[in-house]
Each structure stands twice: as structure tokens, then as C-alpha cells.
Image (cartoon, rainbow, N blue to C red):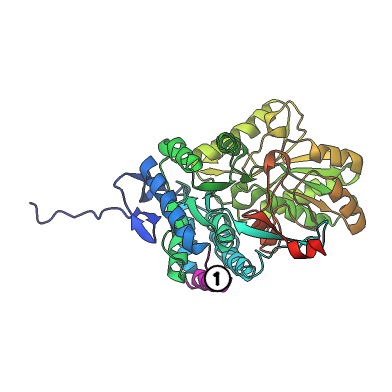
Amino acid sequence: MDSTAVEIPAPEVVPLWIDNQPVSPGVTFPVTNPKTGKVVWEAAGATRDIAQAAVDSAAKAFLTWSCTPPKEKRRIFLKAADLVRARRDEIIQTIVDETGSTVEWAAGINADLGAEFLEELASLATTCTMGYLPTTESDARLAMVFKEPYGVIVGIAPWNAPFILAIRAVAAPLICGNTAVLKASELSPKTHSIVGRLLGDAGLPPGVLNIIQHSREDAAEVVGTLISHPAVRKINFTGSTAVGRAIAQQAGRHLKPLLLELGGKASCIVLEDADLVEAARAVVTGGFLHHGQICMGTERVIVMRSIYTEFLSRLREEAAAFKGVGVAVTPAAAQKTASLVESAISQGARLEYGEPLVNGSALQPTILSGLTKDMDLFYTESFGPTISLMSVSGTDEAVALANDTEYGLSAAIFSRDVSKAIMLARRLQTGACHINAMTVHDEATLPHGGVKASGFGRFGAQWGMDEFLQTKTVTVLDTVARKL
């Protein structure tokens, strides 16, 4: 053997996480940084048998975890929030390495908000299962309504905000007394694995949370195994509407309930009395942040015709000054958005800012006007840094245009007349509407979810806890009192 040969270290392998132990079955797949194009580590890939074992483990753990006192659950999740802050730098760097996001996105939306979510949900541990004593037809009959956990929950989390959305997928189910299997994204497996290690270090017992990822080629088999397993009682999924439909079809065949948070085509309506500088800044941030890879991202901007020219000028200024675009998660994702923009331009849309130029995984941000309904970009979620500007003559036209989409996740309205804005918000077919703020907004104390093809059900606070609790009615007939 040549003594001068340099030994190349084996790449890091992100394991599966089952029973609070790392599991490496031998099958791996590469994880690539989209900004550099280089493999950052390998990830262990789950098989059908491993998926089955992960659910079996969670089902066994449910027998004891469902009886764990609420105060103990609260202690564990508050400890986990402390660990998130202590390991903040590791979490941020992992997200940046895997997904190519900016440090600001990895820190604020993921690590910091993740700790806040853990604390808020932990605070609900002692009250989330409070039941009711409803009235009955007879004084001799006592009725009690209990709120109880389902059993094993499958959470399927995406890569675009990997830390916070993984926490959201499992924290509420666990605090309610369920156990969970997190199906991690193949694009951010290490970030999702950190969630398991943090909770294990905080005191979560073995089997209560298991985490598996798989190669893209094995997705159908592994996900199908999770959904069809008899011990799995509910599924929550955050991701594209197309994949959400496929998961809903599978769940429907097994009569299993779902919580779905899917795609969006968010509109921002700018009224005549709006602060145009603030509105333009919010539109650019909501449309270009994280390379537009946000389900709540601003895609349509609906402006009153009387202020259109001035607003467009402000919008160009804010676009030129914005620095937080980042890159797409893959070159193919950047090219997909670019193709939508190029197709719209070829059909007559006007390019008001930027060029649809792709460099690796980065697409130059664009602003378009003159879209018509026969253009794919008019209805298709771009999931990239492009904004479509439209002018209208009044609020009725603005509302109709904002609602002319299959999606219904988020919206925004800018106006100094808050009462008028609230009335308009009530007419929008969305799960949320933010007045004088951008369409991208979520926090630990609010419900989050959509309508129409943006999904159904709600994450967040007590609304999110109720998604993972089922009611049971128990009545007691007092036979002595009945005779009196």
C-alpha cells in the first residue's frame, strides 16, 4: 500500500431515528446543497419493513405515553425549547447546508419560531384535553365528553421551512398524548433528524417519536406503508396540492382522517389610501423571500387603477433593494418557475422588472403585468420569486380577482381604512388575511391552514391541538334519581 496515499473520509450518514436510537440500514442516498451543487452528506433510506417497524414502535409506546401526566409532557417540551436555543447555531447551519436557504430564514422562521412553538404548545399541555359536561334531557342522566388522543399520528413535513414545520407536524400530536412517526423530507433529513434528537435529549421516551426518511424512488412504497398501517389513526401533511391529493386518496381508501396544509396563490390588494412604500416593501418581501418557496408567498398584486403607476414605481425600487432572495432547492425547481414566466411573456405579459434568468439553482426575481387567464402563470402556483401585477377599478373587482383561484391559504390588504379592510378580508376565500402586512405570516398563538385546494384543518395553538384529539361521550343514568 502506498504510504503517501491520502485516505478520503467516509461521508457523514444521517441515520433514521427509532426508539431514540440512530438506525442505519445500509441503504443510503445523497443530500446535495443547492447553492454549491455538492453532496453534503448521505442519508439512510427507509424500506417498507423499517416503516412498518417505526409504526409498531410508536404503537407500543402509545400505551404508556397516552397515560403520561400533562405536567410531565409540559416539562419535556419546555426543556426541548431550551435545547433549541442552546443548539441554535447547529440547527441554522444544517438548514443552510441542506436547503441552501439564507441564514436569516434558517434562524428567524425556523430555529427561533420553532422554540416559540414548543413553548406555546407546552403551555397547553394541562388544558388541551379538558372535556365538557353538557346538559341532558333528564336530571337523572349525567353526560361527560372526554377529549382523547387518537393513537399513532403520521406527520409528513416538507423541506422549505424544515425545522419549524417538522416541529409543527409532531409537537401538538405528542402533547395531546398521541405518538408519532415523522416522515422526513429527502431534501432535509438531517434537519428533521435534529428534532428527534432534541426531544429525546429533553426526556421524550423511546418510540414516542420515530423519524424516517427515504429516497425519492422509495416514496410511494414507504408512504403507502405508513398510511395503510392499522395502528396509524391520522395523517398530517404539509406540501404541494398535487401530493396532498394523492395522500388524501390513499387515506380515504383506509378511512383515515387528514390535516392538510397545501399550496397557495396569495393575493395582496392595495387600495387607494394605502401607504404605498409599506405595501411595496411587503409585496417584494412576501414574493421574493426564500426564493418564493413559501406556501403563503405573494404571487398576485391587485392594485387600484388610480395608483397603479405610482405603485409600480415603488415596487421596482423595493425589488432592486431586496437582498434576501436565496436559491431554489434544486435547479429543476428554478427552471420550472422560469418556464412559467417565459411562457407568460411569450403570450404577451409585460416584464416590469428583472429577467427570468437561471444560474444553477438561482432564478432572478421578476415582476410581470398584463397576465391573462389563458396563461399558466395566472392560475399555477409558481413557488418562485415572481410577482404578477394587476389593476382593477374597484373593490368588488379586486375581491373577485383574488378569489379566482383554486387555492385559499393567505391574502393581504393594504389600506388606512382598517374597517373597510376588515370587511374586504371577510369576503376573501382564504384561511387568513393580513391587513397592512405581508401575506407570509404565522405565529405560535394563531391557527394556520387554508380552504379550497389549500387544504383543510388547522395547525397552531388550541385549534391545532383539537386536530389531534377525538371526543368520547360517556353517560351515567342514576337509576335511583329516575324513580324519584
Query: Is residue 108 rendered to the left or right of residue 139?
Result: left
Can the viewer see residue 103?
yes
Helix, strand or loop at disc 1? loop
216, above or below 183, in the image:
above
**Residue 411: x percent and y percent?**
76, 48
Q: Nearer the viewer, residue 481 or 153?
A: 481
In magenta, the rendered stretch is 67-86
Label 1 sits on what residue type? Answer: Pro
Q: Quick one: quadrant of the C terminus?
A: bottom right
Does 400 appear in magenta? no
Query: Is residue 139 rendered to the left or right of residue 119?
Result: right
Q: Residue at x 41, y 37 (%)?
A: 218
Q: Nearer the viewer, residue 133 or 123?
A: 133
**Residue 346: x percent and y percent?**
67, 26
Q: Nearer the viewer, residue 184 or 333?
A: 184
147, above or below 45, in the image:
below
Residue on which disc 1 sits: 69
Can the viewer see residue 190?
no
Toward the left, the furthest residue is 1
**Residue 37: x percent and y percent?**
42, 46
